[in-house]
Amino acid sequence: MAQTKQLLGLDVGAARIGVAMGDSGVRIAIPHGAIDVDGTEVSAIAELVIANDISTVVVGYPRNQSGEATEQTGYVESFSERLKDIDADIVFQDESLTSVIAEQRLVARGHTFTKGDIDAEAAVIILQDYMEQQL
């Protein structure tokens, strides 16, 4: 039986990074909050990787509706370069409309939520999509 791998999903934004965690065995992503972009975000991600024995970091990859790169695509690529020293594989997963879908899900649940909750739910969608397509 193959060993299960721990995965970390990231929805990278300029103000916050939504975080989700998943396990290749059960293949269910769960929200893990948001990290403020304040200069400590890379070390915070590195700490999560170490503490949770993460083997793969799945980063949401933004594109416009035509599938073309955007300004945000460049920002995410640049940010991902900053993760290169973290001891985990860094992979990209399409994040088209994840924030919109995340907010719709949270509204449907009927509870109050923050922008950080939307970011974490978007990270869940990114990670879940990756696990369903790649594992």
Image (cartoon, rainbow, N blue to C red):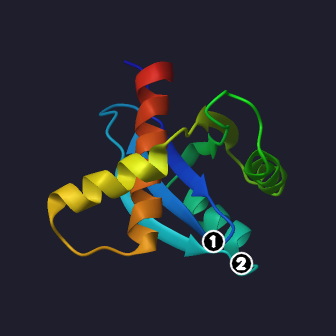
Q: Is residue 69 left or right of residue 121?
A: right
Q: Residues within 10 Å of mark 2 (few under 14, many from 20)?
A: few
Q: Quadrant of residue 73?
A: top right
Q: Is residue 91 left or right of residue 84?
A: left
Q: Is label 2 in contact with label 1 (beta carbons under 8 Å)?
A: yes
Image coords of residue 110 (percent x, y): 15, 65
Residue 31 seen by the camera? yes
Residue 135 appears in the figure: no
Q: CA distance from mark 2 to mark 1?
A: 6 Å
At 34% from the left and 31% from the top, the residue drawn is 25
Count of numbered marks: 2
Which amino acid does the dot numbered 2 rest on? Thr
Q: Could you tell me the amino acid type at mark 1?
A: Ala
Secondary structure of the residue carrying tag 2 is loop
In this view of the protein, which residue sits in the foreground, 92 or 2? 92
- Point out the image quarter for the N terminus: top left
* Residue at numbered disc 2: 40
Q: Quadrant of residue 96?
A: top right
Residue under circle 1?
44
Q: x%, y% of residue 124?
A: 41, 48
Secondary structure type for disc 1: helix
The structure residue drawn at horizontal position 69% and vertical position 68%, both measured from the top left corner, is 14
Crowding at mark 1 (Cα within 10 Å: few <14, some 14-19, many 20+): few
23 is higher (above) or lower (below) than 21: above
- How far across and how far down the image is residue 103, in percent? 36, 57
Who's the residue at 66% across and 63% down the image?
Answer: 46
Q: Position of residue 115 (x, y in %)?
A: 44, 72
Residue at figure coordinates x 55%, y 40% from the top left: 95
Q: Is residue 63 left or right of residue 132?
A: right
